[in-house]
Amino acid sequence: MPSRTAVGFIAPLLLLMIVVFDAPILYMLALGFWSKQGGFTTEHYGNLLEATVYLKVLASTLRISLIATIANVLIGYPLAYWMRSLSPRAQLVAIALVITPFWVSILVRTYAWIVVLGNGGIVNSALINLGLIDEPVRFLYNELGVTIGMANVLLPFLVLPLFAAMLRIDNRVLQAAASLGAPARTIFWKVFFPLTIPALSAGALLVFILSLGFYVTPAILGGNRVSMVSNLLDKLINEIPRWEQASAISTLLLIVALAIFAAYRHFDRRVQS
Amino acid sequence: MKRRAFTHLATAGVAMTAIGGVARAQVKEIRIIEAGGKSGESIDEYIKPFRTKTGINCVRENPNPLGKLRAMVESGKITACLFELGSDSAAQARGLKLIEPLDWDAIAPQPMFPEARTEFGLGYQYFSTVMAWRKGVKEPKSWADFFNTKDFPGKRVLPDYPQYCLAFALLADGVAPDKLFPLDVDRALKKLGTIKRDIAVLWKAGAQPPQLLNDNEVQYAISWSGRVAGQPKIAFTFNQGMFDLSYICVPKGAAKEERAAAMKLLHEMTVVQNQAKAAEVVSYTGCSPELEALLPKDKINEFPTTKANKSVQWQQNAEWWRDNGEMVDKKWEQFRLNL
C-alpha cells in the first residue's frame, strides 16, 4: 500500500491547490448569485438575457477565436509538415525558431506588430515604395490585426504537438502506400492526414480555448474596436465595478469552454473507436 | 539628526492628538494609489514638502482602477490610505460606500476653487478633455467641425470611455453646453455612428492619442489636454472642451494614524507654490484660484484652469454619470459591436 504515504506527501500540494486555486474559483462562481443586499439572486443571469449585448460580445469572441484558430491551422499545419521533411539538425533550428517568440513578452510582441504593420510600418512602406499600393493597407485596429496578433502568439501551441505527432508517423506506412501505386496526393490525404487528425484537433482545441481569454491583443491591435469578452470583464471588474455581473459572464464562458471540450472528447472517442 | 527627527515626530504627534484625539506618531510611511504617468510623478511635488515637515514618507503606487479600491475595502486590508479617483469614479465610490469623509479641519486648506472641496474628496488636479489634431491638417474650430469628416477628412481616435466622449457628439449635434445633462445617450450614439467609418481606434490609455497622432495613424483625436500639450507635431484647443477634476479620497477603514498623516499631505496639495511646481511636471493644474500668476508665461495656454481657458470650457457632471453609468455602458458596448 504505497498510496497512503503518497497521499501524505501530496496533501500539502492538494491543500495549496484548493486554497489558492479552487476556493477563489468557487467564490467567483458564487458571486454571480449574490445580490446587492447579500442574498441569493439570479438577476445577474437574468441581466444576460435582458441586455443581449453581453451575449453578443460572447458570440463575437467565439467568432474571432474561431477565425484565429482556422488561421493557425492554415499556417501551422504546412509549417509542421515542412519541418518533418527537414534533416534532424535543421529540425532543431526550426523548432528553436518556433519557440523563441514564446520567450518574448506577449506585450512586446504585440507592440512589435504596430511597428511592422502600422500605416508607416515596414510592410506598408515597402508595398508603397514598390508601387504595389497607393494608400497604406489598414492591417491594424480591426479584426485582421487581432487575428494576425493572435495567430502569432498561439502558433507554437499548435505546431509543437502537431510536429511531434507527425514525427511519430512511420515512414514505412507511407512507403507501403507508394509501393501500391498511390500518387503523392492520395498518400497525403488517405494516409498521412488521417493519422495527424487527433493531434491537429487537440492542438486546434487548445488554441481555440486560449483564444477565448485573449486580452492584450484585442486591446492593442484591435484598437478596442474589436469586442472580446476579457476586455468586457476588465471593464466590469475594474471600472464599474460590477463583479457580480462579471462573475455571471465568466461562468457562462466557462460553461461554453467546457461544452466545447466535451464535444471534442465525444468526437475524439468516436474517432479512436 | 535622528534626535531631531524624533522631536519632529513627537511634535507632530502632539499636534495630531490635539486635532484628532486619536493619533499616535508611529506612522513612518503612508501610501497613495494614483493614476500613473506624468500626473503621478507630479504628486512628488506635494510629497517633498510633506516629508520635510512631518518626517513621514509617502510611497506612490499606480494605476488606480475602481476595482482595486473595492477589493481593498471589501477585504478589509487597506494598504493605502489615499486613493486618486476621477470625478465620476469618486461619485461612484461614494455611492458604493468605499470612501470616507475627509477631515477638513485637519487639512486646513489654503484658498481653493469651490468645486474642488467636497466632503469625500479633495480635487487636487484639473484636467481637460479636448480636441487635438496633427499639425498640417485642416484645423477644426468646433465639435461640429470635428464630426464633419467630409470637410475635415482624416481618421479619428476617441476615448473608449463614454463619459469622456458622448457629450462632444451632442455638442457637435447642436446641443448647448449648459443643456448637455441629462445626456441624450441615443442621440449622441447616433451622431457618433455617422463618423464610425473614420473612427480608427478607441483609446484606453491616455498615452495612445498623442502616439497615434505622432505616427500619423490618425489625424484627429479626443485627448486629455496634458498628453497633447507641448507636443511639437500636435495642436489642440480648450474651446468647448470639458474640464474635470481628479479627487484624492480616503478608502473606508483606513488606519486612524495613517489617515491623520494623510490629511497633512492633502494640506500640501492646496498650497499654491507646490501646485506651481507640480504644473511644471505635467500641464494639469491644482485647485488654487491664485495659481495662474505662478505658471510659466510661455506655456500659459496649456493649462486647463487659466481664466481664458476655463471660461471656454464646461464641467463634467459626475453625479449624472454615477446614476447612469451602467446603463450607458451597455449601450456603449452595443455601439462598439456595430463599429
Image (tube, rainbow, N blue to C red):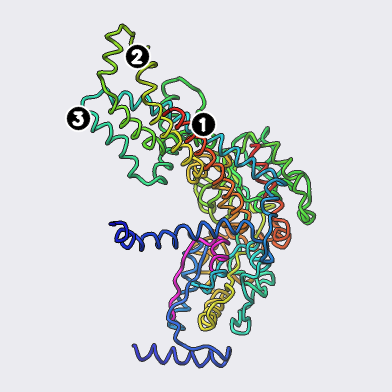
User: Foreground residue, B240 or B322?
Assistant: B322
The residue to which callout 2 is attached is A187
The mark found on residue A67 in the picture is 1
Could you tell me which chain the residue with mark 3 belongs to? Answer: A
Q: Is residue A159 left or right of residue B291?
A: left
- Residue A87, image x, y percentages: 21, 25
Could you tell me which residue is drawn at 30 percent across and 12 percent down? A177
Q: Residue at x 63, y 84 (%)?
A: B105
Q: Earlier in the sequence, mark 1 or mark 3?
A: 1
Q: Nearer the viewer, mark 2 or mark 1?
A: 2
The image shows residue A150, relative to residue B303, as above or below, that is: above
Residue type (three-letter) at the residue carrying disc 3: Arg
Instruction: Please state the extent of the stretch shown in magenta in the rendering.
Output: B56-72
Q: CA distance from mark 3 to mark 2?
A: 26 Å
Q: Read off the residue under disc 3.
A: A89
Q: Quadrant of residue A6?
A: bottom left
Quadrant of the image for the C terminus of chain B?
A: top right
Labels 1 and 3 share a subunit: yes
Q: In terms of secondary structure, where does tag 1 sit?
A: helix
CA distance for labels 1 and 3: 34 Å
View extreme (front): residue: A1
